Image (spheres, rainbow, N blue to C red):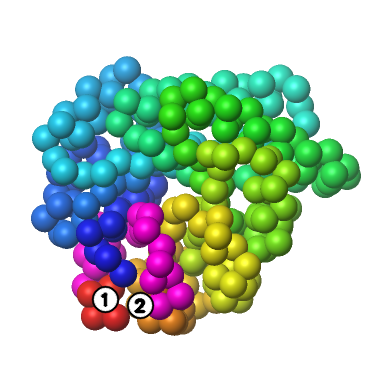
C-alpha cells in the first residue's frame, strides 16, 4: 500500500474534530474523511474551521454522507424527500473542498421488508438523483458495501454490481469496505468480482463475525494478500477506526506488511 494515499476517519471520536485533525499529518496520514454528522456535521458554523484546515494543512479531504436516521429506501414520501434534501445539502456544503462522497445504500424498513422490490427500486432511484446532485458539483459518489446485518442492501458483490449497473451513472463507483466484506467471508469475492468498480477503500479489521472496526492487523483479515490484489488500485485508503490511537497502531502495522 502507498501510505501517501492513506486517510483517517472516525465517527466515534466525538471530541472537537477541528483540534485532533491537525495532528493527523504528525501520525503519517495524508487525508481526512469527514463523517458528516455529530461533531463533524458540516454547517455554516463549522465550515470556517474546515476551510482553515483545508488551507493550512496538506490533508486531502473526502466525505462520508450522513447515515443516521436516513434511509435511501424509505417508502414514506415525506421522509424520502427529506433524505434527498439532506444529501443534496451535504454535497453542496462539502463541494468546496472535497470531490468524493461515500454513501450507504438503503435498507428495508418493516414496510420495505413486505415489498422488497419497491425498497430496492427506491435505493436505485435515490442514488440516481444523488449522483445527479453530485455531478452539479463535479463530485464522485462511492456507494459502500455493508456488513452482515439484517435487512440492508449491498452486502454481497453481485448486489453491489447490480446497484452500479441499475443506477447507470458515470460518477458512481464502489467504496470497498474490507472489514464489512470480512463479516460475510467475502473479501476475495469482492476482489474478484468488483475490482473494476472500486473507486475508494475503507480499511479496518475484525474476526469475521461482526463489524468491530479494529486496527489493521488486529483481526483475521489477510492484509498481505488483500493489498497484493489491490496493487493496481490508485485511489485512497481510509482507516475507519474508533480512536486516534487505533489509527496510529494501524499505520505501524501497515508499514510492516
Residue identifier under label 1: 253
> Is residue 110 on the magenta stretch?
no
Does residue 27 show up? yes
The answer to whether 63 appears left or right of 47 in the picture is right
Between 47 and 113, the one lying in front of the other is 47
Q: Earlier in the sequence, mark 2 or mark 1?
A: 2
Residue 166 x %, y %: 73, 44
- Near mark 1 (Cα within 10 A), the count class, few <14, some 14-19 or many ≥20, is some
Residue 4 x %, y %: 22, 59
Q: Which residues are magenta?
A: 228-252
- Up-down: is 43 above or below 164? above
Report the number of numbered marks.
2
Q: Dots 2 and 1: beta carbons under 8 Å?
A: yes
What residue do we see at 47% from left, 38% from top?
Answer: 140
The answer to whether 132 appears left or right of 245 in the picture is right
Locate the C terminus and report the quarter of the image it occupies.
Answer: bottom left
Between 126 and 37, the one lying in front of the other is 126
Residue identifier under label 2: 217
Residue 236 x %, y %: 35, 55
Amino acid at each position: 500500500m502507498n501510505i501517501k494515499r492513506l486517510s483517517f476517519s472516525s465517527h466515534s471520536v466525538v471530541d472537537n474534530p477541528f483540534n485532533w485533525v491537525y495532528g493527523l499529518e504528525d501520525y503519517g496520514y495524508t487525508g481526512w474523511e469527514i463523517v458528516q454528522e455529530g461533531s463533524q456535521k458540516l454547517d455554516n458554523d463549522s465550515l470556517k474551521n474546515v476551510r482553515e484546515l483545508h488551507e493550512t494543512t496538506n490533508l486531502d479531504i473526502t466525505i462520508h454522507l450522513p447515515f443516521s436516521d436516513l434511509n435511501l429506501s424509505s417508502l414514506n414520501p415525506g421522509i424520502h424527500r427529506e433524505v434527498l434534501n439532506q444529501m443534496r445539502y451535504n454535497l453542496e456544503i462539502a463541494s468546496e473542498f472535497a470531490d468524493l462522497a461515500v454513501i450507504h445504500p438503503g435498507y428495508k424498513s418493516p414496510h420495505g421488508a413486505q415489498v422488497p422490490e419497491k425498497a430496492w427500486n427506491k435505493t436505485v432511484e435515490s442514488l440516481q438523483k444523488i449522483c445527479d446532485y453530485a455531478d452539479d458539483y463535479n463530485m464522485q459518489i462511492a456507494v459502500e458495501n455493508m456488513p452482515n446485518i439484517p435487512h440492508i442492501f449491498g452486502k454481497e458483490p453481485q448486489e453491489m454490481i447490480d446497484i452500479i449497473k441499475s443506477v447507470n451513472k458515470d460518477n458512481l463507483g464502489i467504496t470497498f469496505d474490507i472489514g464489512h466484506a470480512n463479516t460475510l467471508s467475502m473479501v476475495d469475492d469482492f476482489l474478484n468480482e468488483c475490482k473494476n468498480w472500486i473507486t475508494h477503500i475503507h480499511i479496518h479489521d475484525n474476526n469475521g463475525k461482526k463489524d468491530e472496526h479494529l486496527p489493521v492487523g488486529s483481526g483475521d483479515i489477510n492484509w498481505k494478500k488483500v493489498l497484493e490484489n489491490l496493487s493496481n488500485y490508485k485511489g485512497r485508503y481510509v482507516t475507519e477506526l474508533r480512536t486516534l490511537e487505533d489509527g496510529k497502531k494501524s499505520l505501524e502495522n501497515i508499514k510492516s506488511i
